[in-house]
């Protein structure tokens, strides 16, 4: 029996490899024994294969998500049977929404141990249900040629499906019967790559020249999933179009075409401002915007403007404002329109640049050099190594970066912006640090606590990592929401102070630790040579909300006055 | 709109309350705001309601599992939308297999934000799929009388379903549209309890007198789910039947009817021993046995013995040896047969008692007072406060307790013995400590690391807890499995040393810490007054496996000789 299993598992692993799965995150367990042993053997023969070990499967799955997010190739997760597999559920849901190709390989008890009280035998069939793209059971212990041919085809096709647009997670379930020891050092079967091609659908039939010529065109760049930000910047430059750039668009690079204050301007703006910036056509790229204000504004704009949404995002637009979806690659769409002669006047561009420059100046003036949560994004932006990776936690860090990040030093920004969870942030961030010298994670205390186990991967693989923790001892974002008025219950239900000493976390995982009370000390700590460090910035939730509100109020009145003056 | 929402949520919460949901574990989030605010308000009026807050939803769900496991009443879990809900997946799978009534309440985005790129909008419909008993979407914002009547009925019925045999988890999904602030201090709607009765199916039609009279009858008591261990002990006494008692059966109390060495005897036994102990009839109670040896033995016995399995375990028996399933409550079955005049000779009982006493003596002699992982169960058993709760981690702790625990001081033993995961152990254990003065968790270093976040609940609610950590720096159980021979890959893939200092974990969560190198110091540390403490026992994986194997070999030859002598 074992030689059949050994051969079929090798066919399976070589098939994954042929389809480009080279990074694996393995969590130890008994049922997966033959798969991981043969994988480890294969890795000794193919140096492209990397195996990462993570005992906590939740952390492992977010780590795999991070590897796939950064390298944009599918990552294999391998675990044993039982709750190990359910631990992947959160990262799988995130991968589905943020279009990350995860190949989830769940070892399982054999069919005859289903529903019959056998230990560690949960129902693993289509385990992630609505949150995966595809599910398949592969039989690796059947001694028939059809089985091994099917395994070879189906495992390759399943990886290919994870890469079909929109990309996403797939589950391969492997029921395995004892004995589970494979034969090591045996000959490899021959596996050939099957090619799964997509028809080229880049040529667009609509006459975009007619739609775009002689119009006020605004590009809105949302979170970038595949790599097209340079094309987008070239398009803006070529056509004199402003880009309203989401913090995750990777287009904030200080270029004059980039409008980075869209959220603040629209959030605090009056009807006059909204009229002032209103375009005739919006060209949207990328995922759901971090800015809720800009998203809401799209609904209003759509009554008078054409909104075109380009990309393979499942024709998703929760603002229901798009009237023109272009399914296809962003690059090929841009190629189609970048050289059109559209007879553009740069007037709209210049108007937006002027407004944005004013906004940027005022925003910085209003902060008065005060040290607060508001000032962290700029301090990080100005003081990290060039081309650092920045990973942002959900909740407040991503929001503050949206408003206060310019892209001075880097444009590699990551965030789990599909399901927007604060879970798994640390593990995902650690993975994006693999192979890079300079990595910064900006995170709040709750998210750090939630996925503290992710620090184990930093420790195990000695990943260079600077963690900036904004510690306001609890859930800062809730202070911005209406429930903050329910004072009898607020602190218990939403504030949720954890009272953990960040210094003790640093000690546990061998990070250097800096507690920094002012801007200069943050800069010093960022400059410090330690390869792995945690920089703690203490803050107060209620002061933080006041600082945000005061800045927005003052900013709003300045920007409104500016527009009134301009419109005179 | 809000008054409708407020009224319907109150109907929903009062319905849960009427059906017996009194303990809630809440994880903070925005979408669940109206539910948790109104729950907090309700809790000020009904003192039976307890709300626990846990930021890490995975930990929260295992904490809820622990509350339901200990108190045997349904527990509500409440979380926000998105990956918060997927974080529950592992505890839900465990609850399904170990028959724990969890009422999983997942807040969700409203229907119009499904599949359309809205933030934090994963697919929550039937999220746990094959691993829950029931799923329902409840609309709480529809202003029609039918809606509120339906909500009242369906939420009550859903809780009732979690309690139907076999018990298990249910999911109630609550799509909620903004605004999310409820009206506090408003009048309560009237909610009446609906009664869901089961027909009484306790009267058994089979003529058990005929099956059981004048036979060698062996009771096998597996893990106890509901409370019948006293009845079982009374049955044994009344009929002179031995009980082969699983460590989780709660029947190990030193009574002479209790055979506690079944696993060791059968695991090391020859054919002569197996013949020696073979019964004519086996009466099985409880869940899947911890002992794989006894389970395998059942397959052999079934060719010559009648095997009767009593209880609401879905007629599950993965050994496929049962030929007589009795679906119904254990208590009522016992009541039916306890007073039958079966004309039993105590010969079989006495034979097993003699064998077990010999086994117990030899087992203790063979350990030679050596201090090792093997000796921990007995040291704990002998030296904790009477009626302590003991929570056992999966992997090695439960196995060592199966072989070395007598029940000297306590019979409240818990373990997550459905899916047998090492995840969530700490959180579940913390919950079983609520309301009890003396609680012991026995756990390995990997499981402690996996669910370290569970310690937050001990810190937050000041739960009295002694954690005994057997630290062999990695996955000890794998050294017992065939892969330990794949020496090139073993340590990386299976050994997985974490190199964490347990003392640093204690510091982080404010536990007292003891590192104990010998038996006397374990006893001293157990005696120490600290309310929350971690006792670390360092051990070596390869020495541990040798100690287990050597003891089993010697024990096997002693017990075989004993039986040969007896059979002469």
Image (cartoon, coloured by chain):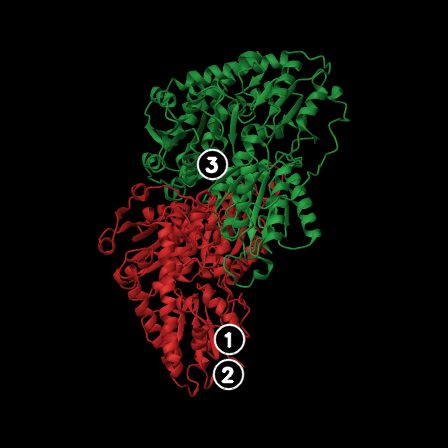
Chain colours: A green, B red
Determine which residue is flagged by label 3: A425
> Marks 3 and 1, Cα distance to the nearest angstrom?
51 Å
Q: CA distance from mark 2 to mark 1?
A: 10 Å
Q: Nearer the viewer, residue A7 or A556?
A: A7
Percent of width and height locating residue A394? 48, 34
Residue on which the image places disc 1: B308
Q: Residue at x 49, y 24 (%)?
A: A403
Q: What chain letter is assigned to the residue under label 1?
A: B
B12, above or below B249, in the image:
above
User: Mark 3 against mark 2, which lies toward the viewer?
Assistant: 2
Q: Label 3: chain? A: A
Marks 2/1 in contact by CB < 8 Å: the verdict is yes
From what the image shows, is residue B112 above or below residue B169?
above
Residue drawn at x 54%, y 27% is A248
Q: How many residues crowd around disc 3 within 10 Å: few (fewer than 14), some, or many (20 or more)?
A: many
Q: Is residue A449 visible?
A: yes
* Quadrant in the picture for residue B120: top right
Q: Earlier in the sequence, mark 2 or mark 1?
A: 2
The residue wearing badge 2 is B211
- Looking at the picture, how far across and down is residue A203, in whole percent? 75, 26
- Where residue A2 appears, as percent x and y from the top left, is 58, 54
How packed mark 1 is, by other alpha carbons closer than 10 Å (few <14, some 14-19, many 20 or more), is: some
């Amino acid at each position: 029996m074992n030689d059949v299993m050994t051969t079929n598992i090798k066919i399976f692993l070589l098939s994954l490899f042929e389809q480009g799965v080279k990074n694996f995150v393995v969590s130890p367990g008994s049922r997966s024994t033959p798969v991981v042993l043969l994988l480890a053997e294969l890795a000794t023969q193919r140096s492209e294969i990397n195996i990462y070990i993570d005992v906590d499967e939740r952390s492992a799955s977010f780590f795999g998500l991070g590897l796939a997010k950064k390298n944009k190739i599918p990552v294999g997760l391998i675990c044993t049977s039982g709750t190990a597999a359910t631990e992947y559920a959160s990262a799988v849901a995130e991968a589905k929404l943020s279009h990350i190709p995860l190949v989830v390989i769940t070892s399982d008890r054999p069919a005859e141990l289903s529903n019959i009280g056998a230990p560690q035998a949960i129902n693993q069939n289509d385990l992630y249900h609505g949150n995966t793209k595809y599910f398949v059971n592969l039989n690796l212990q059947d001694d028939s040629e059809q089985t091994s041919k099917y395994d070879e085809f189906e495992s390759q096709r399943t990886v290919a499906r994870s890469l079909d647009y929109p990309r996403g997670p797939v589950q391969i379930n492997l029921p395995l019967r004892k004995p589970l020891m494979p034969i090591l050092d045996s000959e490899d079967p021959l596996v050939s790559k099957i090619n799964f091609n997509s028809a080229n659908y880049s040529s667009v039939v609509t006459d975009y020249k007619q739609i775009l010529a002689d119009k006020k065109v605004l590009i809105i760049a949302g979170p970038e999933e595949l790599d097209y930000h340079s094309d987008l910047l070239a398009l803006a430059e070529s056509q004199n179009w402003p880009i309203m750039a989401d913090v995750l668009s990777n287009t904030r690079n200080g270029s004059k075409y980039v409008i980075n204050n869209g959220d603040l301007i629209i959030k605090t703006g009056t009807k006059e401002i909204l009229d002032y910036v209103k375009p005739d056509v919006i060209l949207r790229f990328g995922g759901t915007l971090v800015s809720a204000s800009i998203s809401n504004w799209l609904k209003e704009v759509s009554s008078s403007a054409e909104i075109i949404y380009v990309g393979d995002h499942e024709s998703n637009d929760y603002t229901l404002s798009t009237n023109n979806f272009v399914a296809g690659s962003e690059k090929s769409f841009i190629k189609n329109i970048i050289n059109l002669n559209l007879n553009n006047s740069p007037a709209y561009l210049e108007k937006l640049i002027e407004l944005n420059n004013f906004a940027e100046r005022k925003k910085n003036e209003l902060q008065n050099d005060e040290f607060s949560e508001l000032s962290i994004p700029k301090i990080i932006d100005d003081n990290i190594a060039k081309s650092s990776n920045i990973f942002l936690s959900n909740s407040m860090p991503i929001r503050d970066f949206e408003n206060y990040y310019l892209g001075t030093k880097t444009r590699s920004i990551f965030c789990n912006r599909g399901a927007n969870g604060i879970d798994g942030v640390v593990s995902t961030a650690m993975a994006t640090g693999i192979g890079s010298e300079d990595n910064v994670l900006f995170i709040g205390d709750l998210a750090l606590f939630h996925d503290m186990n992710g620090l184990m991967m930093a420790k195990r693989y000695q990943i260079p990592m600077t963690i900036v923790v904004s510690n306001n001892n609890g859930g800062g974002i809730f202070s911005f929401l209406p429930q903050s008025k329910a004072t009898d219950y607020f602190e218990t239900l939403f504030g949720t102070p954890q009272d953990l000493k960040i210094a003790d976390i640093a000690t546990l995982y061998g990070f250097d630790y800096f507690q920094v009370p002012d801007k200069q000390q943050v800069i010093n700590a960022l400059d410090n040579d330690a390869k792995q460090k945690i920089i703690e910035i203490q803050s107060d939730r209620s002061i933080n909300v006041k600082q945000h509100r005061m800045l927005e109020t003052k900013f709003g009145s300045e920007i409104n006055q500016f527009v009134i003056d301009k419109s005179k």
